[in-house]
Image (cartoon, grey):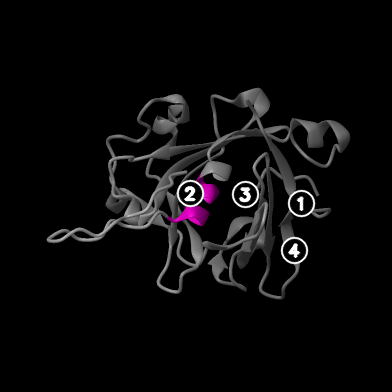
């Protein structure tokens, strides 16, 4: 089954306590590495050329709201489009990447109101500058918990936690693998009986990071 639906991301130093001053926040190396892997422009052109079951898709992820404290994690604007229609993205999201109270790395997903007005802003110096987190629409249950490995991150949504009504689906799942130069994402929709109704059947989309 061919599908458009894919899914769908360093600072070093030590804080030294001094009298009368709070100790500086210790950098989160794993979170910073995750941000580095996620940020950039990606393409599935190689996979599409080798297998007609996959489309040639462009994926862009740009950090936004750099003025916000890093203690809350990082925010990214995400845009996906068919390579032949780059000016008309079919998916626009905001990801909030942070470490939760259980010390897990989480990528939460948010939707935008009237998203097409932000098309192409990943290339700007300050994307989505006029928005704030409280203006976003959270996709509850669709967050991905990512496990850091030596050279990669792997993660997925919860079991039946992400609702979807696309093409008769009851819920959706996402599986993600990230390396420094590759993002592999496998998004699928299932009906209430657990039968797949949309999404790639062979495996995830493979997005190669572009220079």
Tell me whether circle 3 and circle 4 mark residues in contact (CB < 8 Å).
no
- Identify the secondary structure beneath mark 2: helix
Q: CA distance from mark 4 to mark 1?
A: 10 Å
Q: Which comes sooner in the sequence, label 3 or label 2?
A: 3
Disc 1 designates what residue? Answer: 200
**Whole-percent x, y for residue 123 in the image:** 46, 25
Q: Residue furthest left?
A: 20
The answer to whether residue 140 of the structure is visible from this angle is yes
Q: Between tags 3 and 4, which lies in front?
A: 3
Q: Is residue 8 left or right of residue 124?
A: right
- Identify the secondary structure beneath mark 1: loop
Q: Quadrant of residue 44?
A: top right
Give the residues drawn in magenta, as a range. 28-35
The tag on residue 32 is: 2
Q: Is residue 197 left or right of residue 9?
A: right
Q: CA distance from mark 2 to mark 4?
A: 35 Å
């Amino acid at each position: 089954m061919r599908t458009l639906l894919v899914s769908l991301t360093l600072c070093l130093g030590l804080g030294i306590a001094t009298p009368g001053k709070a100790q500086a926040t210790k950098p989160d190396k794993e979170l910073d590495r995750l941000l580095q892997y996620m940020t950039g422009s990606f393409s599935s052109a190689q996979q599409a050329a080798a297998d007609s079951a996959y489309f040639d898709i462009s994926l862009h992820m740009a950090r936004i709201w750099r003025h916000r404290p890093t203690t809350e994690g990082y925010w990214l604007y995400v845009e996906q489009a068919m390579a032949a229609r780059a000016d008309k993205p079919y998916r626009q999201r905001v990801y909030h990447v942070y470490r939760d109270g259980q010390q897990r790395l989480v990528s939460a997903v948010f939707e935008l109101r009237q998203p097409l007005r932000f098309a192409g802003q990943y290339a700007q110096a300050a994307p989505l500058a006029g928005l704030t987190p409280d203006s976003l629409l959270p996709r509850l249950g669709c967050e991905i918990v990512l496990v850091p490995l030596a050279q990669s991150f792997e993660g997925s949504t919860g079991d039946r936690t992400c609702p979807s009504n696309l093409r008769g689906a009851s819920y959706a799942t996402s599986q993600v693998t990230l390396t420094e130069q590759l993002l592999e994402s496998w998004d699928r929709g299932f009906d209430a009986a657990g039968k797949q109704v949309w999404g790639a059947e062979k495996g995830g989309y493979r997005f190669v990071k572009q220079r």
